[in-house]
Amino acid sequence: MITTDIIIIGAGPTGLFAVFEAGLLKLKCHLIDALPQPGGQCSELYPKKPIYDIPGYPEILAGDLTDKLLEQCKQFEPGFTLGERADHIEKQDDGTFIVTTNKGTQHQAPVVAIASGLGSFEPRKPDLPNITDFEDKGVEYMIKEPEMYRDKKVIIAGGGDSALDWSIFLSDVAASVTLVHRRNEFRGHLDSVEKVQELKNQGKINLITPAEVTAIKGADKVEALEITKKDADPVLIETDHFIPLFGLSPKLGPIANWGLEIEKNAIKVNNALDYQTNIPGIFAIGDGNYYPGKLKLILCGFHEATLMCQAAYKIINPGKRYVLKYTTVSGVDGFDGTRKEAPKAVVKAIE
Protein backbone atom coordinates (compact mmCIF):
# COMPACT_ATOMS: atom_id res chain seq x y z
CA MET A 1 0.00 0.00 0.00
CA ILE A 2 1.38 3.40 -1.03
CA THR A 3 0.46 6.11 1.48
CA THR A 4 0.71 9.84 0.91
CA ASP A 5 -1.04 13.15 1.66
CA ILE A 6 -2.56 13.75 -1.79
CA ILE A 7 -3.17 11.20 -4.53
CA ILE A 8 -3.08 13.00 -7.86
CA ILE A 9 -4.72 11.13 -10.73
CA GLY A 10 -3.05 12.45 -13.86
CA ALA A 11 0.57 13.50 -14.34
CA GLY A 12 0.00 16.24 -16.89
CA PRO A 13 0.98 19.90 -16.38
CA THR A 14 -1.80 20.59 -13.85
CA GLY A 15 -0.97 17.51 -11.78
CA LEU A 16 2.76 18.28 -11.82
CA PHE A 17 2.23 21.90 -10.74
CA ALA A 18 -0.04 20.68 -7.93
CA VAL A 19 2.98 18.76 -6.57
CA PHE A 20 4.91 22.03 -6.30
CA GLU A 21 2.07 23.91 -4.62
CA ALA A 22 1.49 21.04 -2.20
CA GLY A 23 5.21 20.91 -1.45
CA LEU A 24 5.18 24.53 -0.36
CA LEU A 25 2.65 23.42 2.26
CA LYS A 26 4.79 20.43 3.30
CA LEU A 27 2.31 18.00 1.76
CA LYS A 28 3.50 14.86 -0.01
CA CYS A 29 2.02 13.77 -3.35
CA HIS A 30 1.84 10.55 -5.36
CA LEU A 31 0.74 10.66 -9.01
CA ILE A 32 -1.03 7.93 -10.99
CA ASP A 33 -1.13 8.01 -14.79
CA ALA A 34 -2.04 5.46 -17.44
CA LEU A 35 0.70 6.79 -19.69
CA PRO A 36 4.24 5.43 -19.28
CA GLN A 37 5.77 8.88 -18.65
CA PRO A 38 4.72 12.16 -16.98
CA GLY A 39 3.43 15.05 -19.04
CA GLY A 40 -0.01 13.88 -20.14
CA GLN A 41 -1.02 15.01 -23.62
CA CYS A 42 1.99 17.36 -23.75
CA SER A 43 4.31 14.34 -23.76
CA GLU A 44 2.15 11.74 -25.48
CA LEU A 45 0.39 13.67 -28.24
CA TYR A 46 2.40 16.76 -29.14
CA PRO A 47 5.77 17.07 -27.34
CA LYS A 48 7.10 19.29 -30.15
CA LYS A 49 4.04 21.56 -30.33
CA PRO A 50 4.74 25.17 -29.35
CA ILE A 51 2.59 26.66 -26.55
CA TYR A 52 2.20 30.43 -26.43
CA ASP A 53 0.12 31.19 -23.32
CA ILE A 54 2.33 30.06 -20.43
CA PRO A 55 3.27 33.10 -18.30
CA GLY A 56 6.94 33.98 -18.62
CA TYR A 57 7.42 31.95 -21.83
CA PRO A 58 6.59 33.74 -25.09
CA GLU A 59 6.90 30.27 -26.66
CA ILE A 60 7.72 26.87 -25.18
CA LEU A 61 7.46 23.37 -26.63
CA ALA A 62 5.00 21.11 -24.82
CA GLY A 63 7.73 18.58 -24.02
CA ASP A 64 10.00 21.29 -22.65
CA LEU A 65 7.17 22.55 -20.43
CA THR A 66 6.88 19.06 -18.96
CA ASP A 67 10.63 19.01 -18.29
CA LYS A 68 10.47 22.39 -16.54
CA LEU A 69 7.54 21.31 -14.35
CA LEU A 70 9.34 18.09 -13.39
CA GLU A 71 12.44 20.09 -12.49
CA GLN A 72 10.34 22.49 -10.42
CA CYS A 73 8.62 19.78 -8.37
CA LYS A 74 11.44 17.23 -7.98
CA GLN A 75 12.66 18.89 -4.75
CA PHE A 76 9.42 17.71 -3.13
CA GLU A 77 10.10 14.08 -4.12
CA PRO A 78 6.76 13.06 -5.60
CA GLY A 79 5.98 9.38 -6.12
CA PHE A 80 4.79 8.02 -9.46
CA THR A 81 2.71 5.03 -10.52
CA LEU A 82 2.98 5.16 -14.31
CA GLY A 83 1.52 2.89 -16.96
CA GLU A 84 -1.43 2.06 -14.70
CA ARG A 85 -5.00 3.37 -14.84
CA ALA A 86 -6.87 4.43 -11.68
CA ASP A 87 -9.86 2.08 -11.73
CA HIS A 88 -11.51 2.09 -8.30
CA ILE A 89 -11.84 4.42 -5.32
CA GLU A 90 -13.18 3.54 -1.89
CA LYS A 91 -13.70 5.77 1.13
CA GLN A 92 -12.53 4.25 4.40
CA ASP A 93 -14.03 4.54 7.87
CA ASP A 94 -11.22 6.90 8.90
CA GLY A 95 -12.11 9.28 6.05
CA THR A 96 -9.19 8.39 3.80
CA PHE A 97 -9.49 7.07 0.26
CA ILE A 98 -7.97 3.98 -1.34
CA VAL A 99 -7.38 4.25 -5.09
CA THR A 100 -6.69 0.96 -6.88
CA THR A 101 -5.25 0.72 -10.39
CA ASN A 102 -6.05 -1.78 -13.13
CA LYS A 103 -2.90 -3.67 -12.07
CA GLY A 104 -3.97 -3.87 -8.44
CA THR A 105 -1.63 -1.22 -7.02
CA GLN A 106 -3.28 0.47 -4.02
CA HIS A 107 -2.77 4.03 -2.84
CA GLN A 108 -4.15 5.61 0.34
CA ALA A 109 -4.54 9.31 1.20
CA PRO A 110 -6.99 11.70 2.88
CA VAL A 111 -7.26 13.77 -0.31
CA VAL A 112 -7.63 12.81 -3.97
CA ALA A 113 -7.10 15.31 -6.81
CA ILE A 114 -8.32 14.26 -10.23
CA ALA A 115 -6.12 16.01 -12.81
CA SER A 116 -6.65 13.56 -15.63
CA GLY A 117 -7.43 16.16 -18.27
CA LEU A 118 -9.74 14.79 -20.93
CA GLY A 119 -9.39 11.30 -19.48
CA SER A 120 -8.97 8.60 -22.10
CA PHE A 121 -9.30 9.98 -25.58
CA GLU A 122 -9.18 9.19 -29.25
CA PRO A 123 -8.87 11.55 -32.22
CA ARG A 124 -12.00 12.67 -34.04
CA LYS A 125 -11.69 11.35 -37.57
CA PRO A 126 -13.15 12.89 -40.72
CA ASP A 127 -15.98 10.96 -42.36
CA LEU A 128 -13.99 9.47 -45.23
CA PRO A 129 -14.76 5.83 -46.14
CA ASN A 130 -11.18 4.69 -46.77
CA ILE A 131 -9.29 6.79 -44.20
CA THR A 132 -8.32 3.79 -42.06
CA ASP A 133 -6.57 2.25 -45.08
CA PHE A 134 -4.11 5.16 -45.04
CA GLU A 135 -3.44 5.45 -41.31
CA ASP A 136 0.34 5.41 -40.77
CA LYS A 137 0.65 5.59 -44.56
CA GLY A 138 0.41 9.36 -44.81
CA VAL A 139 -2.58 9.97 -42.52
CA GLU A 140 -1.64 11.12 -39.01
CA TYR A 141 -4.02 12.44 -36.36
CA MET A 142 -1.33 14.05 -34.23
CA ILE A 143 2.20 15.33 -34.70
CA LYS A 144 4.88 13.90 -32.45
CA GLU A 145 8.00 14.51 -34.51
CA PRO A 146 7.85 17.51 -36.86
CA GLU A 147 11.08 16.52 -38.61
CA MET A 148 9.28 13.68 -40.39
CA TYR A 149 7.58 16.41 -42.46
CA ARG A 150 10.83 18.06 -43.48
CA ASP A 151 10.62 18.96 -47.21
CA LYS A 152 7.31 17.10 -47.57
CA LYS A 153 3.98 18.29 -48.93
CA VAL A 154 1.49 18.54 -46.07
CA ILE A 155 -2.26 19.17 -45.96
CA ILE A 156 -3.81 20.01 -42.58
CA ALA A 157 -7.57 20.10 -41.97
CA GLY A 158 -9.20 21.87 -39.03
CA GLY A 159 -10.09 25.25 -37.62
CA GLY A 160 -8.87 25.20 -34.02
CA ASP A 161 -5.64 26.11 -32.28
CA SER A 162 -3.86 22.85 -33.14
CA ALA A 163 -4.53 23.21 -36.86
CA LEU A 164 -3.45 26.86 -36.84
CA ASP A 165 -0.36 26.37 -34.65
CA TRP A 166 0.93 23.38 -36.60
CA SER A 167 0.33 25.13 -39.92
CA ILE A 168 2.43 28.02 -38.65
CA PHE A 169 5.17 25.76 -37.29
CA LEU A 170 5.39 23.49 -40.35
CA SER A 171 5.52 26.45 -42.75
CA ASP A 172 9.26 26.59 -41.93
CA VAL A 173 9.71 22.81 -42.14
CA ALA A 174 7.61 21.33 -44.93
CA ALA A 175 8.01 21.89 -48.66
CA SER A 176 4.40 23.11 -48.73
CA VAL A 177 1.58 23.52 -46.21
CA THR A 178 -2.09 23.65 -47.14
CA LEU A 179 -4.69 24.42 -44.48
CA VAL A 180 -8.28 23.39 -45.24
CA HIS A 181 -11.22 24.52 -43.10
CA ARG A 182 -14.93 24.20 -43.74
CA ARG A 183 -15.60 27.79 -42.64
CA ASN A 184 -14.01 31.15 -43.29
CA GLU A 185 -13.89 31.79 -39.53
CA PHE A 186 -11.48 29.96 -37.21
CA ARG A 187 -11.97 28.92 -33.57
CA GLY A 188 -8.35 29.52 -32.56
CA HIS A 189 -6.62 32.46 -30.92
CA LEU A 190 -6.79 35.69 -32.90
CA ASP A 191 -2.98 36.00 -32.95
CA SER A 192 -2.71 32.59 -34.64
CA VAL A 193 -5.42 33.44 -37.16
CA GLU A 194 -3.62 36.67 -38.06
CA LYS A 195 -0.28 34.83 -38.36
CA VAL A 196 -1.78 32.26 -40.74
CA GLN A 197 -3.24 35.06 -42.86
CA GLU A 198 0.16 36.77 -42.91
CA LEU A 199 1.89 33.55 -44.00
CA LYS A 200 -0.76 33.07 -46.68
CA ASN A 201 -0.01 36.55 -48.01
CA GLN A 202 3.70 35.65 -48.06
CA GLY A 203 2.96 32.49 -50.04
CA LYS A 204 4.15 30.17 -47.22
CA ILE A 205 0.71 28.67 -46.50
CA ASN A 206 -2.00 27.73 -48.99
CA LEU A 207 -5.31 28.51 -47.25
CA ILE A 208 -8.49 26.95 -48.67
CA THR A 209 -11.82 28.01 -47.10
CA PRO A 210 -14.67 27.22 -46.91
CA ALA A 211 -13.80 23.72 -48.07
CA GLU A 212 -13.53 20.09 -46.99
CA VAL A 213 -11.38 17.09 -47.82
CA THR A 214 -13.79 14.75 -49.61
CA ALA A 215 -11.55 11.88 -50.74
CA ILE A 216 -8.09 10.35 -50.28
CA LYS A 217 -6.26 9.07 -53.34
CA GLY A 218 -3.32 6.71 -53.46
CA ALA A 219 -2.14 3.14 -53.85
CA ASP A 220 0.05 2.04 -50.93
CA LYS A 221 0.16 5.51 -49.36
CA VAL A 222 -1.44 8.94 -49.55
CA GLU A 223 -0.68 10.56 -52.89
CA ALA A 224 -3.36 13.24 -53.23
CA LEU A 225 -6.50 14.63 -51.62
CA GLU A 226 -9.72 15.68 -53.25
CA ILE A 227 -10.76 19.04 -51.83
CA THR A 228 -14.21 20.43 -52.45
CA LYS A 229 -14.79 24.14 -52.02
CA LYS A 230 -18.28 25.50 -51.56
CA ASP A 231 -20.06 26.06 -54.88
CA ALA A 232 -17.09 24.76 -56.84
CA ASP A 233 -15.93 21.54 -58.48
CA PRO A 234 -13.55 19.28 -56.52
CA VAL A 235 -9.84 19.76 -57.07
CA LEU A 236 -7.07 17.21 -56.60
CA ILE A 237 -3.97 18.35 -54.68
CA GLU A 238 -0.87 16.17 -54.45
CA THR A 239 0.44 15.59 -50.93
CA ASP A 240 2.66 13.32 -48.87
CA HIS A 241 0.75 13.73 -45.58
CA PHE A 242 -2.83 14.41 -44.54
CA ILE A 243 -3.20 15.61 -40.93
CA PRO A 244 -6.84 16.07 -39.82
CA LEU A 245 -6.79 17.97 -36.52
CA PHE A 246 -10.40 17.90 -35.37
CA GLY A 247 -9.68 17.54 -31.67
CA LEU A 248 -10.08 14.61 -29.32
CA SER A 249 -13.16 12.69 -28.30
CA PRO A 250 -12.88 12.62 -24.49
CA LYS A 251 -14.00 9.75 -22.29
CA LEU A 252 -13.80 9.87 -18.51
CA GLY A 253 -13.30 6.09 -18.34
CA PRO A 254 -13.65 4.42 -14.91
CA ILE A 255 -13.84 7.83 -13.19
CA ALA A 256 -17.39 8.15 -14.56
CA ASN A 257 -18.44 5.33 -12.23
CA TRP A 258 -17.08 6.82 -8.99
CA GLY A 259 -20.29 8.58 -7.94
CA LEU A 260 -19.06 12.02 -8.98
CA GLU A 261 -21.46 14.56 -10.42
CA ILE A 262 -20.87 14.80 -14.16
CA GLU A 263 -21.87 17.70 -16.41
CA LYS A 264 -20.90 18.28 -20.05
CA ASN A 265 -18.80 15.09 -19.93
CA ALA A 266 -16.64 16.56 -17.15
CA ILE A 267 -16.56 16.47 -13.35
CA LYS A 268 -18.64 19.23 -11.79
CA VAL A 269 -16.81 21.20 -9.07
CA ASN A 270 -17.44 24.13 -6.76
CA ASN A 271 -15.26 26.85 -8.25
CA ALA A 272 -16.51 29.43 -5.74
CA LEU A 273 -14.38 27.70 -3.09
CA ASP A 274 -11.75 25.13 -3.92
CA TYR A 275 -12.69 22.91 -6.92
CA GLN A 276 -14.01 20.17 -4.66
CA THR A 277 -16.47 17.67 -6.15
CA ASN A 278 -19.75 16.48 -4.63
CA ILE A 279 -17.67 13.98 -2.62
CA PRO A 280 -15.78 15.81 0.17
CA GLY A 281 -12.05 15.19 -0.07
CA ILE A 282 -12.10 14.56 -3.83
CA PHE A 283 -11.13 17.49 -6.05
CA ALA A 284 -11.02 17.87 -9.83
CA ILE A 285 -8.62 20.33 -11.47
CA GLY A 286 -7.58 21.04 -15.03
CA ASP A 287 -9.36 20.17 -18.27
CA GLY A 288 -11.39 17.35 -16.70
CA ASN A 289 -13.54 19.58 -14.49
CA TYR A 290 -16.56 21.77 -15.22
CA TYR A 291 -18.00 24.95 -13.75
CA PRO A 292 -19.70 28.00 -15.29
CA GLY A 293 -17.17 30.00 -17.30
CA LYS A 294 -14.63 27.16 -17.42
CA LEU A 295 -11.69 27.72 -19.80
CA LYS A 296 -9.62 24.69 -20.78
CA LEU A 297 -6.23 26.35 -20.55
CA ILE A 298 -3.10 25.08 -18.80
CA LEU A 299 -2.72 28.33 -16.85
CA CYS A 300 -6.28 27.91 -15.51
CA GLY A 301 -5.31 24.44 -14.30
CA PHE A 302 -2.35 25.97 -12.44
CA HIS A 303 -4.71 28.37 -10.64
CA GLU A 304 -7.11 25.55 -9.74
CA ALA A 305 -4.25 23.41 -8.44
CA THR A 306 -3.10 26.22 -6.14
CA LEU A 307 -6.50 26.68 -4.50
CA MET A 308 -7.01 22.91 -4.27
CA CYS A 309 -3.78 22.52 -2.29
CA GLN A 310 -4.82 25.24 0.15
CA ALA A 311 -8.08 23.38 0.80
CA ALA A 312 -6.26 20.03 1.04
CA TYR A 313 -4.03 21.46 3.77
CA LYS A 314 -7.09 22.25 5.90
CA ILE A 315 -8.45 18.71 5.43
CA ILE A 316 -5.14 17.08 6.30
CA ASN A 317 -4.39 19.49 9.18
CA PRO A 318 -7.80 20.30 10.73
CA GLY A 319 -7.68 23.27 13.09
CA LYS A 320 -4.11 24.13 12.15
CA ARG A 321 -3.70 27.67 10.85
CA TYR A 322 -1.59 28.28 7.79
CA VAL A 323 -0.27 31.71 6.93
CA LEU A 324 0.35 32.26 3.23
CA LYS A 325 3.98 33.18 2.55
CA TYR A 326 5.26 34.48 -0.76
CA THR A 327 8.17 32.44 -2.10
CA THR A 328 9.94 35.69 -3.02
CA VAL A 329 10.19 36.33 0.74
CA SER A 330 10.26 32.88 2.35
CA GLY A 331 12.20 30.89 -0.24
CA VAL A 332 11.39 27.23 -0.90
CA ASP A 333 12.15 24.30 1.41
CA GLY A 334 12.42 20.95 -0.37
CA PHE A 335 11.71 17.59 1.25
CA ASP A 336 15.35 16.67 0.67
CA GLY A 337 16.44 19.34 3.13
CA THR A 338 17.66 21.78 0.51
CA ARG A 339 16.53 25.38 0.64
CA LYS A 340 16.31 28.00 -2.05
CA GLU A 341 16.49 31.41 -0.43
CA ALA A 342 14.70 34.43 -1.82
CA PRO A 343 17.13 36.95 -3.33
CA LYS A 344 18.23 39.45 -0.66
CA ALA A 345 17.40 42.40 -2.91
CA VAL A 346 13.83 41.17 -3.20
CA VAL A 347 13.49 40.62 0.54
CA LYS A 348 14.89 44.06 1.28
CA ALA A 349 12.54 45.73 -1.16
CA ILE A 350 9.50 44.01 0.36
CA GLU A 351 10.60 44.77 3.91
Image (cartoon, rainbow, N blue to C red):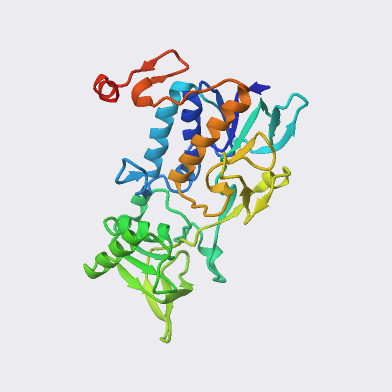
Residue 81 visible at all: no
Residue 206 at what x, y percent from top left? Answer: 31, 70
Q: Residue furthest right?
A: 93
Q: Residue furthest left?
A: 202
Horizontally, is 295 left or right of 110 in the view? left
Horizontally, is 223 left or right of 58 in the view? right
Q: Residue at x 66, y 33 (%)?
A: 281
In the displayed structure, would residue 160 be above or below residue 302? below
Quadrant placement of the N terminus: top right
Q: Nearer the viewer, residue 43 or 190?
A: 190
Q: Residue at x 43, y 65 (%)?
A: 159
Residue 199 at what x, y percent from top left? Answer: 26, 64
Give the image quarter of residue 210: bottom left
Q: Residue at x 33, y 64 (%)?
A: 193
Q: Residue at x 42, y 72 (%)?
A: 225
Give the image quarter of residue 285: top right
Residue 135 at what x, y percent from top left? Answer: 51, 60
Residue 140 visible at all: yes
Horizontally, is 129 left or right of 345 in the view? right
Residue 2 at what x, y percent from top left? Answer: 64, 22
